[in-house]
Amino acid sequence: MANTKSAIKAARKTVRLTARNKAVKTRIKTLHKKFEAAVASGDKEAARSAGSAYASAMDRATKSGVIHRNAASRAKSHVSKHVLAK
């Protein structure tokens, strides 16, 4: 158990931030699966809209510090590679 005031506050903060991070990462994984399914199906319009939603979610996660900016950049590059190739 935390002994100091700052450690008690840090423990409360950790619970809140962990819940936020888990929710954001779960949403990103779901959007990634939808994007991959759209690419696999060959539907260009579905892939474009799913890719856009996925890239947008990555940008928001980067802004809040949940995802590293290089990881988001890599994911967006992956999206553009698949969307532009078809």
Image (cartoon, grey):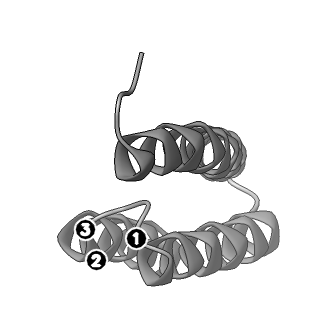
Does residue 85 appear left or right of residue 50 in this picture? left
- Percent x, y of residue 76: 39, 75
Query: Which residue does the image show at 28% across and 77% down from the upper left?
Result: 73
Residue at point 80%, 65% (across, down): 46
Question: Helix, strand or loop at disc 3?
Answer: helix
What residue is shown with label 3?
74
* Dot 2 alpha-carbon crowd within 10 angstroms: few under 14, some 14 to 19, many 20 or more: some
Residue 63 position, x and y percent, is 47, 84
Q: Nearer the viewer, residue 50 or 83?
A: 50
Q: Amino acid at mark 1?
A: Gly
Q: CA distance from mark 3 to mark 1?
A: 16 Å
Amino acid type shown at disc 3 = Arg
Image height of 78 relative to 76, above or below = above
Dot 2: element: helix
Query: Which residue in the structure is indicated by mark 2?
Result: 73
Residue sticking out furthest to the top:
1
Task: Give how far across and how far down residue 21 sits, in percent.
Answer: 56, 48
Q: Is residue 76 above or below residue 3?
A: below
Q: Is residue 48 above or below residue 4?
A: below
17 sits to left or right of 30: left
Which of the numbered marks, if any, corresponds to residue 65? Answer: 1
Instruction: Determine the residue positioned at 77% across, 75% down.
Output: 49
